[in-house]
Amino acid sequence: MGFWAAFLFLLVCLPLHAQKKNEAFRLHIKKTNVPIKIDGVGDDSAWEATEVAKDFYMVLPMDTDKANEKTEIRMTYDDKNLYLLATFYHSKKGPYFVESLRRDFSFGKNDNFLMFIDPFNNQTSGFSFGSNAFGAQWDGTMFNGGNVDLNWDSKWISEVTRDDEKWVFEMALPFKSIRYESGVTEWGINFSRLDLKSTEKSSWTPIPRQFPTASLAYTGTLVWDAPPPAPGVNFSVIPYVLGSVSRDLENNADTDYETKIGGDVKFSLTSSLNLDLTVNPDFSQVEVDRQVTNLDRFELFFPERRQFFLENADLFANFGYATIRPFFSRRIGLGVPIQGGARVSGNLNKKWRMGLMDMQTSSIDDTGLPGQNFGVLSLQRKVFSRSNINLMFVNKESTNYPTENDSLRSLYPRFNRNVGMEYNLASPNNLWTGKAFFLKSFAPSQIGNGVTQGAHLEYFSRRWNWRVQEEWVGEDYTAEVGYVPRRGYVSLSGYFGHLMFPKRGKILSHGPKLRSTYFFNESFITTDYLNLLEYGFDFIDRSNLKLFVGDEFVRLLSDFDPTRLGIADLPAGTENRWQAFGWEYTSKPQSLYTYTFNGRIGGYYENGTRTSLTTEIGYRFQPYVSLIANLNYNHIAMPSPWNTNQFWLIGAGADITFTNKIFFANLFQYNEQTKNLNVNSRFQWRYSPASDLFLVYTNNYFIAPLEGRNWGLTLKLTYWFNK
């Protein structure tokens, strides 16, 4: 009890009330009556009367001085739009570095500018907008005080110009495209710049180097001369029409021709709360999942990519931990058509956020699967300066449920429910973070009526960082709409690390980190552990290297084939222990040719050995073409009957961006472990803001003998109508 008493004291009683860190940084914005042309030139007279945010602070390589590269930001507004003009001078001559013209680019591989706005000034949620030096746009929603979800898209326009001395970014953001509280005259705001020529990342407000510039704890304040205009009625209809042709060769099916019509509706209930409706949704244009080599004993996680589920997704998806999620939206519509759904999400006021979702899927006559309704309610209440308390309820209910067929009732339970509470700690200066949660599941039978809980506390300063965490998942706990790959365990984990900063040389920082994870069954008998000793190096040129040695123990909880090739299973209860060492290296992003190289060499099950080598090689013809190749090789040597096995996973991609509105992405994947070869091509033309034409082709083959499995071609058109 001593540990828990100390833990709860730290979690709740840390200094949580404090003045906003960068309260003194204030940018005043005034209304203009002069038209502004968005052309990336910035010569409109409206900009002459604006206040300038300048004298940026360096964040990287070191946060102890002002930035060397000069940046100037101006803002104004009218009745419809918020405007921004940003000018980025550079003292070091040389080319600009960009990966491509694709929207929502990789931050660390581009010369770029990002704006972070916190309309509720709660240092927890908001929006991010920006661009790279060639005009590729970036936009996303912000959550958890500094995370950005780039899956969210909105309607706004921007232009970029460049010369030898500077690049200029100009944007117009409609007030209808964001959510904010009416009548408020102060928003949180910050601006971030990455200049790869000088390897300098800078921010308008000072931010400790261990935190991202997106950290809302360190925003300044945007001071309006009057409350920003109420967005009024914001009503959008986003229909789609689709035609496709496909064939399942594996089952010798006939060619299938399909046409579909459906769409979404967006309606602002208030200036900060949105209603989304979807009818007969289609997600055929969604980026295909990356294949992986699977040597894991438990279910793998693949992220949600469907647009309808992504706005304010943190309200639904971030409860619990990565492996204890009561709600995982990919469970909805898994091989089953979605008939329709509704979602209400956003801010009720400065303290409260809400997410309410209801989705209905069809029944499947061939398997007897009944129609299913998925309901989720999430409420979030801000407490102290940046912490919050969450409540969640998840309900999966079968409709038209079979009342007489016992086999179907055991195969498809009538309902599964989860209810839980969570406390998220975030100190005013972001040094301390933590979480504590409890979940209870409900089901028709005893199996399914269980509990789970977890908690952690983390400290993250410039030189020292550590974390302690515990989890307990009961054997009877179930989350049919969640992601909980493992049950019936107690886990203790944590890490402790230290960084050192040389005063000169090519190494920016280096230091050790010790990680440990222990799993026990509910009788506290050890079933797994992993201890890792790491040593990392971050270099001035933004490349990095990590070396590690590990000690691992596994007692199998169920039969398991350690090759995943279907050769033979090790029986449950088998105990194995081995050691391994490895490395991870990432090259500097400024080169046209980039690469990562990871490796692991060591023991494996049954006193065997496993060597795993992974590399990613990229080359870009900036800004139009980005080529990438991924290679993963595994060599496993074990006694009979497994013997020696080796298999490759090869991926190759060509991302062609003709403009910042026309994209052509191609992905080739060869997975020797699953005997599958996949080709996916996706053409996208954003012919109008948030409106697209897609042409998607996919084909899967058996590797040996090489023969088709299935293929498909889809043409889809969407358009965003605004009122």
Image (spheres, rainbow, N blue to C red):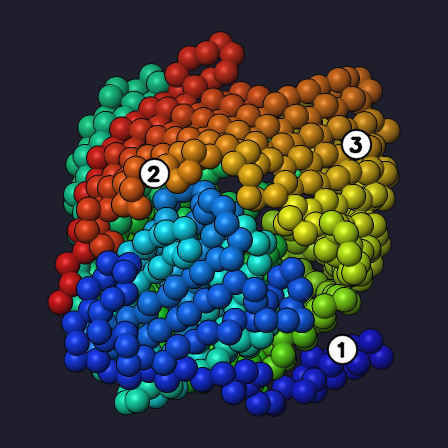
Marked residue nearer the N-terminal end (3 or 2): 3
Q: The residue under label 2 is which amino acid type? A: Thr
Residue plotted at (39% across, 40% down): 623
How far apart are labels 3 and 2 at the CA level? Answer: 39 Å
Answer with left or right where residue 717 lies relative to residue 149: left
Q: Secondary structure at mark 3?
A: strand
Secondary structure state at the residue bearing disc 1: helix
The residue pinned by badge 2 equals 657
Which residue is painted at 39% across and 60% down in the image? 130
Figure quadrant of residue 8:
bottom right
Q: Which mark is residue 7?
A: 1
On the image, the x and y values in percent for residue 351 come to 45, 85
**Left or right placement of residue 468 versus residue 235 in this view:** right
Q: How many marks?
A: 3
Q: Quadrant of the C terminus?
A: bottom left
Q: Is residue 24 above or below residue 474?
A: below
The span from disc 1 to disc 2 (Cα, nearest Å) is: 51 Å
